[in-house]
Image (cartoon, rainbow, N blue to C red):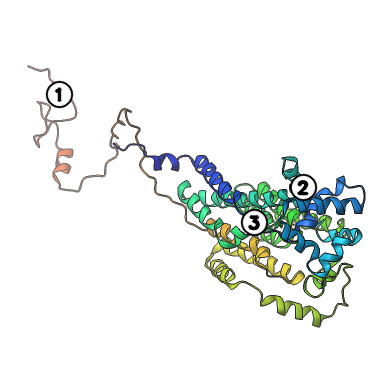
């Protein structure tokens, strides 16, 4: 008799294990000290744009909200640090002119507003979006692993992956990178079971980071489970969302963004003339800034994939290479979608457990009835005793010539 142990109960309750994982990850992420970057100012501003009457009012509201939540030393660096920060802190028009680079992240602005409606202060809402994204990433990894292995093992794998240093650092940052990575991973995790859910997750990731449309479109175009019509439609939706979010945001333009990001950041957002020499110099400098401690293991993980996972990984990596060509930056926070997507694909490559464990029996329940042998037995070997017994004619007393009882009753009455 095998009794139901706690381990067996948890393995039969994947939702219970998933909720426990979410609770633990949320509790661990809530106590982390946020890393405040200057980008929190424009992100708070785009979440307050609808409530400000003028650029001056928006400028005053933004700096006042951030000052109330960040440490005094950090706020001083925001307003008295580099020349660019001093200029936009004094000039409301210069500050609002920079918002075109951030306004295209529509989903992130809506998430900050939603956190504000839930009671969080504007700057605090930016932090809570990253914390929720960390929990969402753990949930996506758990869902991907639970389809291939038991709930307890899936929870352990998800907890181990989200505690990798790049993801832990992303949960403290005031940028949309971890949220976009979590939504991207959720889309990849949902794709095998529901293509509509997968496209929805990828679309939301694009609304947080429009440049993710390139790897997302590459994935759906090469997905083995999608017909050409579905793949073309999904890719068109993703690229169209990227174009719509960018064209209506007042973006300063591709080369100007590259110039002010890697050459000279000025409050008037002016850039030098485009030349291929300048572009390749920027690419060469950026290629040396990658953190090899996580990039090399991720590349090795991609090489271990086979079949459909390998094709999907190749399509994703080609999309990320195209993204690097447009914006040549290899900062860790920009590589979070790469790490998250490779983790989901690797979990999808794990072999499914096919051996069924014996069903446990609850204490006090009646024992299961014995299993009767099937009626179709293998034929006896020729010449064996069982073969002779089979072919002996029945004796008059109901036995057989071999001396064993017959299965048929005797036709004579009993004396």
Is residue 356 depicted above or below 263 in this figure? above
Determine whether, in the image, residue 299 is placed left or right of residue 127: left
On the image, the x and y values in percent for residue 176 come to 71, 56
What residue sits 30% from the left and 30% below the top? 367
Instruction: Give the number of the mark in front: 1 or 3.
Output: 3
Q: Is residue 186 visible?
A: yes
How much space separates mark 3 and mark 2, taking CA atoms? Answer: 19 Å
Q: Pointer 1 and pointer 3: residues touching (CB < 8 Å)?
A: no
User: Which of marks 2 and 3 precedes in the sequence?
Assistant: 2
Residue beneath label 1, please?
410
Crowd rating for badge 2 (residues with CA inside 10 Å; few <14, some 14–19, many 20+): some
Tell us which disc is closer to us: 2 or 1: 2
Question: What x and y, as percent, mark residue 212?
Answer: 72, 60
Residue indicated by mark 2: 110
Q: Which mark is residue 225?
A: none
Q: Nearer the viewer, residue 383 or 69?
A: 69
Out of 65 and 373, give the one closest to the viewer: 65
x and y, in percent, of residue 66 in the image = 77, 53
Q: Is residue 61 above or below residue 215?
A: above
Instruction: Name the quarter where the C terminus is drawn.
Output: top left
Q: Residue at x 79, y 57 (%)?
A: 41
Tell me the SS state at disc 2.
Answer: helix
Q: How many marks?
A: 3
Q: Earlier in the sequence, mark 1 or mark 3?
A: 3
* C-alpha separation, residue under disc 2 versus residue under disc 1: 89 Å
**Picture quadrant of residue 297:** bottom right
Determine the residue positioned at 44% across, 41% down: 10
Residue with the mark numbered 3: 172
Mark 1 neighbour density, 10 Å: few (under 14) some (14–19) many (20 or more): some
Point out the image quarter for the N terminus: top left
Q: Which quadrant of the structure image shows residue 247?
A: bottom right
Q: Is residue 251 visible?
A: no
């Amino acid at each position: 008799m095998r009794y139901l142990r706690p381990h067996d109960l948890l393995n039969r309750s994947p939702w219970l294990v998933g909720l426990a994982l979410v609770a633990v990850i949320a509790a661990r992420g809530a106590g982390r000290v946020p890393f405040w970057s200057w980008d929190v100012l424009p992100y708070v501003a785009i979440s307050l744009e609808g409530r400000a009457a003028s650029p001056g009012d928006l400028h005053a509201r933004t700096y006042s909200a951030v000052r109330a939540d960040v440490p005094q030393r950090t706020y001083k660096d925001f307003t008295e640090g580099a020349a660019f920060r001093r200029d936009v802190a004094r000039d409301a028009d210069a500050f609002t002119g920079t918002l075109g680079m951030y306004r295209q992240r529509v989903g992130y602005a809506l998430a900050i507003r939603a956190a504000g409606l839930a009671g969080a202060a504007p700057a605090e809402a930016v932090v809570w979006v990253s914390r929720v994204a960390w929990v969402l990433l753990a949930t996506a990894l758990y869902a991907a692993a639970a389809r291939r292995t038991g709930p307890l093992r899936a929870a352990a794998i998800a907890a181990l992956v989200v505690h990798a240093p790049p993801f832990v650092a992303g949960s403290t940052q005031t940028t949309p990178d971890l949220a976009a990575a979590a939504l991207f991973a959720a889309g990849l995790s949902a794709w095998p079971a529901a293509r509509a859910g997968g496209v929805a997750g990828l679309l939301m990731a694009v609304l947080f980071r429009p440049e993710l449309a390139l790897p997302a479109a590459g994935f759906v175009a090469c997905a083995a489970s999608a017909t050409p019509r579905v793949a073309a439609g999904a890719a068109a939706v993703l690229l169209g969302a990227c174009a719509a979010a960018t064209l209506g945001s007042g973006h300063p333009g591709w080369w100007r963004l590259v110039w002010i990001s890697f050459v000279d950041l000025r409050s008037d957002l002016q850039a030098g003339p485009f030349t291929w020499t300048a572009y390749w110099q920027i690419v060469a400098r950026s290629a040396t800034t990658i953190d090899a401690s996580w990039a090399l293991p991720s590349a090795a993980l991609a090489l271990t994939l086979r079949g459909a996972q390998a094709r999907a990984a190749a399509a994703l990596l080609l999309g990320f290479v195209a993204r690097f060509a447009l914006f040549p930056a290899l900062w860790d926070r920009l590589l979070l979608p790469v790490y998250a997507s490779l983790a989901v694909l690797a979990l999808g490559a794990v072999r499914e457990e096919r051996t069924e464990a014996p069903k446990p029996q609850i204490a006090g329940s009646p024992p299961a009835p014995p299993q009767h042998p099937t009626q179709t037995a293998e034929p006896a070997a020729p010449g064996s005793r069982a073969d002779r017994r089979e072919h002996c004619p029945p004796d008059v007393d109901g036995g057989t010539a071999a001396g064993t009882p017959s299965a048929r009753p005797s036709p004579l009455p009993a004396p």
